[in-house]
Image (cartoon, grey):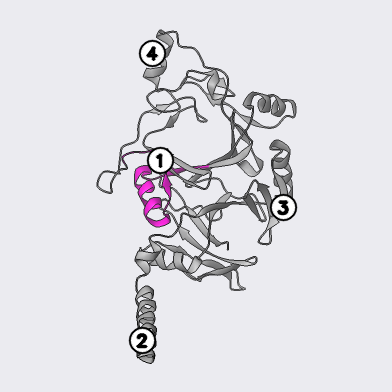
Amino acid sequence: MKTWGLFITATLGLVFAVWSQTQPQDQNSQLPTPGFHHLHLNSPNPEAAIDFYTKQFPSTSKSTWGGFPALKTGKVFVLFTKVNSAAPTEPQTAIWHFGWHVVDVRKNLATYQQNKVPLLPLYTSPEGGEVMISSDTWPGTDGTLGRTSAQIAEAKANGAKPAGGAGFAYMQGPDGAIVEYQGNMPVERFNHVHMYQEDPLCAVLWYQKHLNARPNGRDPLPTEANCKVERSARSWPALEMEGTSRKPSGGVTFDDVSVQWYARQGDAPLASTRGHLADHFALSVTNLDAWIAKLGSEGVRFLGQEKELGDGRQRIEGLGRPYKLGDTRAVMIEGPSREAIELVEVK
């Protein structure tokens, strides 16, 4: 009887193991949300770029990761690939800009002005007018960070005044990067990548479904049936004189880094991020094989690695297969608006 009992136990264990291996979708749908690992930039002079960021944001430091020169900012990295000439910033891709929280935005502004850091003004109306910090013009309304032309006229008629104090501001980073600094926050840290999407609300669903991401502040969530929404009128303050269309918007969070987006601003479809200044961003996962199985079963597009053939041509290899990245492995996928997203295995 004892032998028979051991046989039954072993058999049941084998059956359970086989059953478990046949349930990848159920298991993989419960994979934990990835962490934010790095933003990857292309630069002809990574050392100079890193030096720039360490000077403007004292909490950062020069580092390396995975064989790449790196800027370390908290537990996040900004990695750099050295390229022969400046990487393009046009046509527009899904990655718009990135930025830091700062402790005192006005103190930072004064320091940057003194050190002659190139700064980007915010236009306050379609007719012009500029401020360096968003809170120096009319405060946003209707749940957005800006006001339309009609709302600006209303603010003028009502004698509305700028709030002053904390706000958001921008500088021109190396290689044409747009860098936001925003305060006043408890500590300085890399806090966001701001993007454009073809359909912002549909993108929220994509990130939630495929990457188990946490949506930012939207309840209830849209559905696939109603996620396509027309863009709103443009509003100010804005980096462009013609203003920014701020609705619909959406975003998700990985760790404490927000990946936030508006609808694309122009009529042309967004270009692939690969080869541009901001080439991709990366998320950390503990079980890369499980994520590959999940994403493959959901029809997510994998991006291959370019291999030189020796005659100037290139071949794309390794679709859906992990590649070596420093001491670990990674795979590249494409998001809903052609943004490249790298999944890096971090045990």
Name the residue carrying label 1: 250
Task: Report the Cα–Cα distance between label 1 and label 4.
Answer: 27 Å
Q: Which residues are magenta?
A: 193-220
- Of the numbered discs in the image, which one, if any, rests on residue 63? 3
Task: Report the Cα–Cα distance between label 3 and label 2.
Answer: 58 Å
Asked where in the image residue 89 lies, by quadrant, the reply is top right
Task: Report the Cα–Cα distance between label 1 and label 3.
Answer: 32 Å
Proximity of marks 1 and 3: CB atoms separated by less than 8 Å: no
User: Would you say residue 345 sits in the magenta stretch?
Assistant: no
What amino acid type should be assigned to the residue bearing mark 3? Answer: Ser
Front: mark 3 or 2: 2
Front: mark 2 or 1: 2
What amino acid type should be assigned to the residue bearing mark 4? Answer: Glu
Q: Quadrant of the C terminus?
A: bottom right
Front: mark 4 or 3: 3
Q: Quadrant of the N terminus?
A: bottom left
Residue at image point 44% right, 53% down? 338
The answer to whether any part of residue 314 appears in the image is: no
Proximity of marks 3 and 2: CB atoms separated by less than 8 Å: no
Percent of width and height locating residue 77: 63, 50
- Of the numbered discs in the image, which one, if any, rests on residue 5? 2
Q: Pointer 3: residues within 10 angstroms few (<14), some, or many (20+)?
A: some
- Of the numbered discs in the image, which one, if any, rests on residue 154? 4
Task: Report the Cα–Cα distance between label 2 and label 1.
Answer: 57 Å
Percent of width and height locating residue 33: 46, 54
Residue at image point 44% right, 41% down? 261
> In the structure shown, which secondary structural element does the residue marked by tag 3 occupy?
strand
Of marks 1 and 4, which one's residue comes earlier in the chain? 4
Task: Report the Cα–Cα distance between label 4 and label 2.
Answer: 82 Å
Q: Is residue 41 above or below residue 146?
A: below
Instruction: Count how many numbered circles sit on residues in the image.
Output: 4
Proximity of marks 1 and 4: CB atoms separated by less than 8 Å: no
